[in-house]
Image (cartoon, rainbow, N blue to C red):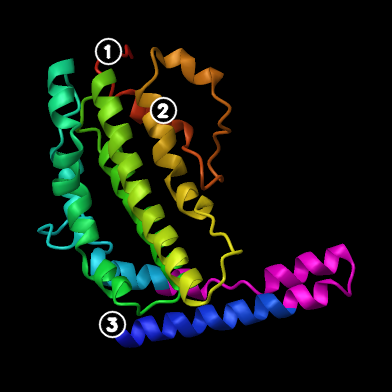
Amino acid sequence: IDAELCALNGISAAETACTALSRLFADLVEEQIQQESTSAGTGNAPPKAASALVAHLCGGDDLFDCDGRLCLQNLRLFIEKEVYNLDSSSFRSLEGEDRLDAEMIGPVRRSQIFEEISEDKCDAGVILQIAEAMSWKSAEIILQVLLQGKSNFNEWGALLLSKEVRMLQNSYCGLVLGSAEHYSTKSANTGSSTSTASILIQFERVNQAVSILQLEKPSDWLSFSYKVGESNETNLTADEIQKIMSLRVDFSE
């Protein structure tokens, strides 16, 4: 694990150096060349490497054929077993942060990958890559469980799922912001800022699913500004939208 993290740190440092050089040359060339220079300096290696590490330590493609030992495997089992067809009393019982933290967020925070990060083994850029990979995997786990069509939802259940997704987002954003503050303090650089936008974008598809489940009626989806298309990686397809809508017990066919 230390060797993998070291390699990620090296890749991140090299990418940062290339980006700095690109910005220097961008001052000397026209806008079109600036854009080409910037895009040429950002490869897919860091995300792929971070994703591989997350798969190794948190759960990979075998998430739906596992015992829940790893944190993302546990997330899949949690979402599968959760009840989302609720009354107001059941909702108040299930939406308590103590329960959600203990059963859903706790295993993530206690995972080996979080422990490695807490031991100061990763650069801030690598931590961001890891958080992005965990966010993407978490969102896809939730979406895949929903698309299996085995869960029944009403409005209370949709509210519960919304809170669970939000807590996951906060956990990953907190990891990134905490590391940024740590490295800013170490370098005495208080002027830099860290964006968590790349974390939140990983949840875009599952957030759309939550929005669908929270609709008062199916036709209300037309009032949303989401552009649905097969080729858009951040949007649900028309078929997926229909499958998500079918989970609401009070929506007619």
Inspect this view and state whether residue 139 appears: no
For the residues carrying marks 3 and 1, which lies nearer the camera in this image?
3
Question: Which of disc 2 and disc 1 is earlier in sequence?
Answer: 2
Question: Which of disc 3 and disc 2 is earlier in sequence?
Answer: 3
Compared with 233, 149 (above or below) is above
For residue 31: magenta? yes
Residues under numbered marks 3 and 1 in contact, where contact means CB atoms less than 8 Å apart: no
**Residue 137 % position (x, y):** 34, 55
For residue 180: magenta? no
Residue drawn at x 32%, y 72% as measured from the top left: 117
| Residue for badge 1 | 250
| Residue for badge 2 | 211
> How busy is the neighbourhood of tag 3: few (under 14 within 10 Å), some, or many (20 plus)?
few
Question: Which of disc 1 and disc 3 is earlier in sequence?
Answer: 3
Helix, strand or loop at label 2? It is: helix
Q: Quadrant of the N terminus?
A: bottom left
For the residues carrying marks 1 and 2, which lies nearer the camera in this image?
2
Span shown in magenta: 22-49
Helix, strand or loop at label 3? It is: loop
| Residue for badge 3 | 1
Q: Quadrant of the C terminus?
A: top left
Compared with 144, 56 (above or below) is below
Query: Mark 3 belongs to which amino acid?
Result: Ile
Inspect this view and state whether residue 196 appears: yes
In this view of the protein, which residue sits in the foreground, 145 or 70? 70
